[in-house]
Amino acid sequence: MDFSFSEEQQAAVEAAKAVFAGVAPDGVPSPALTAGAVADDFDRTLWGKLADADLLSLLLDARYGGAGLDAIALCLVLRESAKVLARVPLLESSAAALAVQAYGGEELKTKLLARAGRGEVVLTVAANGRTGHDGAELAVTARREGDAWVLDGVQTAVPWGCNADFVVVPALSTGSGRAVLALVPRGHEGATLAEQVSTTGERLGELRLDSVRLTARNVIDADGAWESLRDLLATGTCALALGLGERVLGMTSEYTSKREQFGFPVATFQAVAVQAADRYIDLRAMEATLWQAAWRISTGAGGVLPASGDIAVAKIWASEGVRRVVQTAQHLHGGFGADTDYPLHRYHAWAKHLELSLGPAAAHEETLGDLLAAHALG
């Protein structure tokens, strides 16, 4: 087996490192000191740099100006973005564009994909449903009326929903009983957004759909489209958690190497070293399970369990691992970790958001249990 990354994937990482090198995690007000959102919009300047570096079109085919790379390449870039808390809808827009490319009609592809790859059109996904626990497709119904689709329901915590040009909304078709993907333009009649705020301080949107009518070209009703999109979103979230955790452990190492007690750096104390070593093991487990999941969805490789099993395992490790990493970091930093002039508290807030995004560990443990019950392993 060859576990190394391809030259194209490594080139994407180098391009990402160059773009994110100048990004400051504390470039916006602290969420701990801000009553509402820390900013009205995402980082448009950084978005433009990502477009110029061709990092918004990684997954798109060459005919849409893309590099034709896979989920592994996207996860490598997302890993770098999380190290600086990049405030951009890179995961959501990239995943939505890939879903359109894989399952959408030609007219929709022509209309959106090249522009999305250039950063001119921003896509996001309503993946949290009404409660954040039940499947997102259960929160909205879609019914056919002639050549149109009519949507009703509520989706909460839509990332970057107030600023995206299109929200991809999973909905349950009343006719077929399967999930469809509806691309709802911002400001469309019958669609209203109410501001919500994440633990990170970023603006989310509660999207209410009241008899929203869409033409058939804006609705993807291909079998498996939502499941594929959801799998990529979950895997990308694991990549973000890994990158954040690696940066936090690095900050902890730097701090404990300089902080002295009784004339010695606290990093030399056995209790400190053991805790840091445990978190390093967490990160390596997060990394191994992430690449297993990304490899499964990139290659379509088979296995004893469906790819959703590997994704569930990766999300379990990502959710629990990133929580443990930031908790240990706070403990080893002492009171300094809560200092709002020091960025650790920002990473803690983002870690909590990533831990719960697309379901906490318990939800994915339930999914994994169902898969194990349904598939014989012997």
Image (spheres, helix red, strand yellow):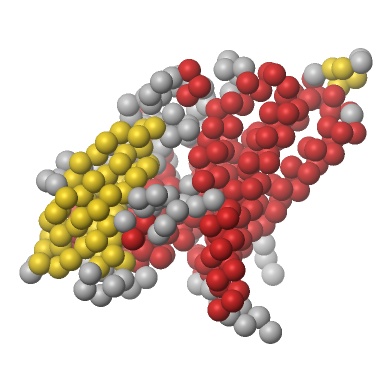
Question: Is residue 274 depicted above or below 39 in this figure?
Answer: below
In front of the other: 376 or 342: 376
Residue 273 in picture, x, y percent from top left: 85, 35
Residue 195, quarter of the rendered image: top left
Identified at 78% across, 37% down, the residue is 276
Identified at 18% across, 66% down, the residue is 143
Question: Is residue 10 depicted above or below 256 in this figure?
Answer: below
The residue lying furthest to the left in this view is 146
Residue 362, quarter of the rendered image: bottom right
Identified at 20% across, 50% down, the residue is 209
| Quarter placement of the N terminus | bottom right
Residue 279 in picture, x, y percent from top left: 74, 42
**Left or right: 284 with respect to 118?**
right
Identified at 80% across, 41% down, the residue is 277
Residue 328 in picture, x, y percent from top left: 72, 34
**Left or right: 262 with respect to 46?**
right
**Left or right: 280 with respect to 37?**
right
Question: Is residue 154 depicted above or below 330 in this figure?
Answer: below
Residue 199 in picture, x, y percent from top left: 48, 33
Residue 107 visible in image: no
